[in-house]
Amino acid sequence: MPAATPEHGRHNFPWERLYSTFNLPTPAFQVLCGDGVHASPPWFNAGVVSAPNGAELGGEWERICLADNDWEWVPERWPYLDQIALPLAMASLSPGSRLTEAGVLDSRLNQNLFHWMEDQSYTAHGFVVHHHGYVSLIKKYYPRVLMWLRQDYPLLDHLLERYGIHENFEGVAASGA
């Protein structure tokens, strides 16, 4: 899933060095960044990952994460280690060890809710939305989905309440409930 969809900015990771370190060709395509101007080699915010063999991808992803984590020359490993390693893992398991546009799902399948964005309406065009621990955003932007889920999952409100206590920023929790 491309991470450089409208809600993401550009990060200058050492892609050429990373790909060459793992003996992989650098992808020949780029994705548009959130500013609508810059492009970047593909990197992935893995809210949803689809793979023919999930266990194989998981093992390769972990292997690359562990290696990347040891290299001081890889900037912003935290919090982006998983996002840096995922395209490398995908490439290493792809035909010809090459990541191609055909192997990347449409960004509508991986929309993100971010607490710092004032307008989250772009997610209305997505099929899958993931969040980074902010239950209040789900409550704010998807009340009809929650109402529908409550019918089959009576523990939903209890889970949302328990999970919501971990929100630690001002503004969204109050406005999203």
Image (cartoon, helix red, strand yellow):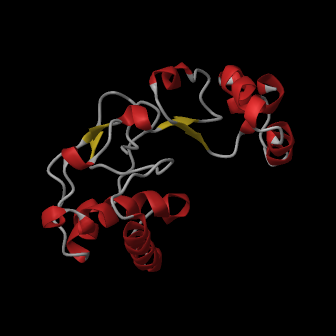
Quarter that holds the N terminus: top left
Q: Is residue 157 left or right of residue 65?
A: right
Residue 94 point in image, percent of width and height: 22, 62
The structure residue drawn at horizontal position 40% and vertical position 50%, both measured from the top left corner, is 44
The structure residue drawn at horizontal position 69% and vertical position 46%, both measured from the top left corner, is 133
Residue 138 placement: quadrant? top right
The structure residue drawn at horizontal position 78% and vertical position 44%, both measured from the top left corner, is 167
**Farthest residue, direction front:** 152
From the viewer's perspective, is residue 43 above or below residue 35? below
Q: Is residue 149 left or right of residue 111?
A: right
Residue 52 placement: quadrant? bottom left
Residue 76 visible in the current orientation: no
Residue 169 point in image, percent of width and height: 77, 40
Residue 86 point in image, percent of width and height: 38, 60
Front position in the image: 154 or 29: 154
Quarter that holds the C terminus: top right
From the viewer's perspective, is residue 157 above or below residue 69? above
Residue 153 point in image, percent of width and height: 76, 38
The structure residue drawn at horizontal position 45% and vertical position 39%, both measured from the top left corner, is 110
From the viewer's perspective, is residue 110 above or below residue 77? above
Residue 110 visible in the current orientation: yes
For the image, the number of numbered tags is: 0
Q: Is residue 60 left or right of residue 159?
A: left
